[in-house]
Amino acid sequence: MKGKKNIMEFLESVIFLIGLLTFVWFLLPLFTHGIMNVGNATGIVGGFVVMIYACQMSRINSWIEKTWNYTYNNINIGKITLSAIGIGAVIGIGLVLLLTSCMVTANRKKPKENATVIVLGCRVYGERPSLMLMERLEAAYDYLIDNTDSMCIISGGKGIDEDISEAECMYRYLTDKGINPERLFKEERSTSTRENLIYSKEIMDRKELNQYVAIVTNEFHEYRAGKIAKTLGLEYSAVPSRTAWWLLPTYYVRELYAIFFEWVF
């Protein structure tokens, strides 16, 4: 009996620690950069729920056992309800694994030489690029240096809390690093990934640029961007940038929601 109690206490401690680490990891972007979206909100709530479960594991397990055996009019309502919840959870986990597999596979779609580069915009703080935008710009810079005949479309409009457009910010960053301004085309109207690609294609058609594109964005974003590009008739490949470890979970979870929305709607 004592050994069983020790095992339960150890299990409770492990589960609580997992919940605490999840809670802190998803809370970190809010405290460091004021980032709050559906991604870290999900992680914060999830971590908190896991911690509550760890603290009340015996009571919750007892309640689940009682619910499982609850019968009304000779119908095991509890078993049916909990089974439905369990099946829903398994389907949800399966969907997450499928979406994750799609994200990973999309990053392996290596670009041809001298493709037309499309850099997808990201938040600008005043006139400074955010960390994720800098990550994208560094990936674009490396590709442009290695592919000297590539032209580049930098795509992103101006948000209400930004002093300049994302495209202008990217233009300044790349030219300051030595990229020839004649290789850069600014697209400053877009406010979403779909608009990034629609308006960039208009520039490609108008300027008669190479129709094979290399999409530069963070690794979690490549799959959805590529799917949109495909609907526009673009042959595409990925130039993924690496997201900071403390930001990746937040934006990975948010992207799961975004991809699911694209699939459904």
Image (spheres, helix red, strand yellow):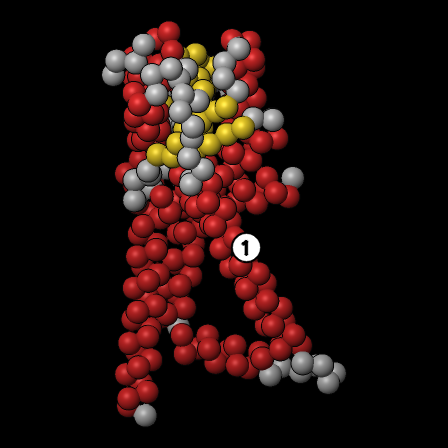
Q: Nearer the viewer, residue 95 or 214?
A: 214
Q: Which residue is mark 1?
A: 95
Q: Which quadrant would residue 198 be assigned to in this image?
A: top right
The structure residue drawn at horizontal position 31% and vertical position 85%, both measured from the top left corner, is 5
**Would you place residue 84 above or below residue 165 in this image?**
below
Q: Horizontal and vertical percent for residue 194? A: 55, 27
Residue situated furthest front in the rendering: 113
Q: Is residue 206 left or right of residue 44?
A: right
- Regarding mark 1 in the picture, which secondary structure is present there? helix
Q: Is residue 57 left or right of residue 6?
A: right
Q: Nearer the viewer, residue 208 or 54?
A: 208
Q: Nearer the viewer, residue 105 or 198?
A: 105
The structure residue drawn at horizontal position 43% and vertical position 46%, both measured from the top left corner, is 104
**Would you place residue 144 above or below residue 33 in this image?**
above
Residue type (three-letter) at the residue carrying disc 1: Leu
How many marks the image carries: the answer is 1
Q: Which quadrant would residue 55 be assigned to in this image?
A: bottom left
**Would you place residue 107 above or below residue 46 in this image?**
above
The structure residue drawn at horizontal position 44% and vertical position 17%, both measured from the top left corner, is 153
Q: Horizontal and vertical percent for residue 30? A: 34, 41
